[in-house]
Amino acid sequence: MTRFATIFAGIDKPLIAMAHLPALPGTPLYDAAAGVQGIVDSVRRDVEVLIDAGFDAVMFCNENDRPYQLKAGPESAAVMTRVVAECRPVSVPFGVDFLWDPSVALATAVATGASFLREVVTGVWESDMGLWNTDAAATLRERRRLGGDDIAILMNIAPEFASPLGGRSVAQIAKSTVVSSLADGILVSGPMAGAGPDQSVLREVREAVPSDVPVLLNTGAQADTIASMLAIADGCIVGSSLKVDGRTWNPVDPSRARAFVDAAKAPAR
């Protein structure tokens, strides 16, 4: 079985919910008065709500560390690891995403026992963070060096806040990412958090890669459209639409979270 299939055995279309961390120490939006304990308390509350709503997995992410860095410091890795270790669920798998340093995500995943991570590890991009050059070879070799062979790496081939350098189509990039970069899953995103891709793009990617490699909707999942998206995709990652007022930076809204799961798992008509 593939890493992804092993993690989500028996689940047809996994629903992965985001647990967004408030800003970490040293970043512009960090709440020094609340401190690191405030981050832990906020994330723990959101995780409890997401598990109660019925999500199949949770993924931790430093979503509010704006502006994002391509290389994070040791303090970010240390606090991220503490938060994940204290808030990780015990009843469902969990993953890690660090914007945008895969070495921190991988180190945190290994240290906390995470099952998967989400990162951009292929391609060169012009982005809000400047010129963004990736290194899939280094990331996968580091996974092997750290003994994290069971950790699935879900590769985002259309990162938010960025555009690719070069003329290849999204489908060509997806196929190449599977063949040359050994992706455990392909993620398709819209232009920014909370905004989804066109269904035609999602379908094009799904048709381009082997059937045993999952293609997941990575952004823009909404309760009123998720059924049609999951008719194409093999699962989804969702964050913004679960929040109070649908705003990325707000706490998770229990009613929105339950409504999303109900819509995604409703029998097809």
Image (spheres, grey):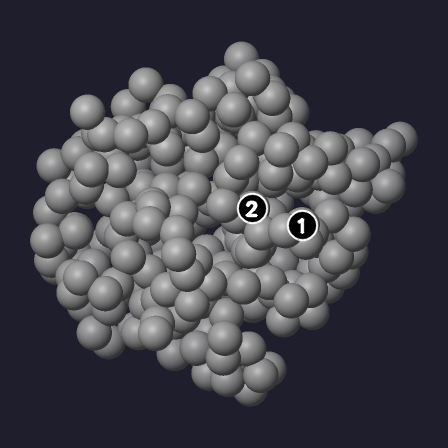
| Badge 2 or badge 1: first in the primary sequence | 2
Observer-nearest of 75 and 59: 59
Q: Quadrant of residue 267?
A: top left
Q: In the displayed structure, does residue 71 sit left or right of residue 184?
A: right
Whether residue 191 is visible: no
Residue at 73 percent across and 33 percent down: it is 45
Tell me if residue 253 can be seen.
yes
Q: From the viewer's perspective, is residue 106 above or below residue 158?
A: below
- Location of the C terminus by quadrant is top left
Q: Which residue is mark 1?
A: 89
Position of residue 50 relative to residue 143, above or below, is: above
Circles 2, 1 touching at the beta carbon (< 8 Å)? yes
- Where's the N terminus, which quadrant? bottom left
Q: Residue extending furthest top?
A: 245
Instruction: Find numbered disc 1 in the image and state the secondary structure of the residue it sits on.
Output: loop
Q: How far from the left and from the top, in percent, is residue 153?
A: 43, 65
Q: Which residue is mark 2?
A: 58
Q: Amino acid at mark 1?
A: Pro
Q: Position of residue 227 (x, y in %)?
A: 27, 29
Q: Quadrant of residue 235?
A: top left
Q: Residue at x 18, y 62 (%)?
A: 211
The three-letter code of the residue at mark 2 reads Val
Residue 203 image point, x, y percent = 13, 43
Residue 154 spot, x, y in % from top left: 39, 59
* Crowding near the residue tagged with mark 2, few <14, some 14–19, many ≥20 C-alpha atoms within 10 Å: many
